[in-house]
Image: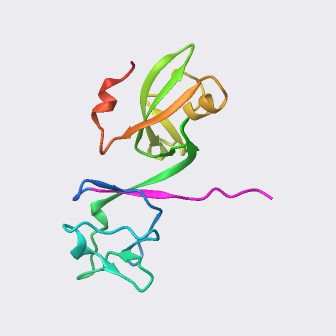
Amino acid sequence: MTKIREIKCRAWDKIDKRMIDDAIVIDFQSGKFYNYYYFTPSKRSSDLFEKDEHGNYSIPIKNGKSDLHRYILMQHIGLNDCKGVEIYKSDIVSVWGSDYGESVHEVKYLAEQNYPAFDLIPHIDSEANGFSDILGGDYHKIEVIGNIWKNPKLLNEGTK
């Protein structure tokens, strides 16, 4: 039997400038945002959330609109780095290979470019997907060093 990969997400709160790391579900039909690990909304945003009888928070719809636009959703890509940290879309990773040295990349989902897969930007100098090269052994280490929301300057550092 084929094992189905668990779909996990996190969200960047653009207003409070913080990451909501727990597994979340956003119901775009109803406009509700659920977090099954009982995060506590900050004082600044607590008026946006309603708490249900199970301790889950949701964003209520007011006047036919919700505040879902304040969140940027990021999916776990199904891989962990060399330290066991889950890798998500919009993470910044350091990649090291003995033949290639060390370089810094953003994890992106490239469906807009007719390439429905996660990859590293800038691309690793390769004919394959960057993650294929890493999993295939061409590189010795991949490590999450930040994300584009909390640490955007890491991308400017480029190749070390």
For the stretch drawn in magenta, the main secondary structure is: loop
- Quadrant location, the N terminus: bottom right
Front position in the image: 40 or 128: 40
Which span of residues is magenta-colored? 1-13
Q: How many marks?
A: 0
Front position in the image: 106 or 109: 106
> Which residue is depicted at the point 58% across and 44% down?
79
Residue 27 visible (yes or no): no
Which color scheme does this rendered protein use? rainbow
x and y percentages locating residue 160 in the rendered image:
39, 18
- Above-or-below relation of 136 to 45: above
Spot the residue most to the right. 1
Side (left or right) of 81 relative to 41: right
> Which residue is depicted at the point 60% across and 59% down?
6
x and y percentages locating residue 76 in the rendered image:
51, 51
> Which residue is depicted at the point 27% across and 69% down?
67
x and y percentages locating residue 26 in the rendered image:
42, 69
The answer to which quarter of the image holds residue 108 is top left
Spot the residue most to the bottom. 53
Front position in the image: 107 or 127: 107
x and y percentages locating residue 131 in the rendered image:
57, 34
Instruction: Determine if the magenta segment contains residue 121.
Output: no
The answer to which quarter of the image holds residue 13 is bottom left
Residue 12 visible (yes or no): yes
Spot the residue most to the left. 44
Instruction: Determine if the magenta segment contains residue 2.
Output: yes
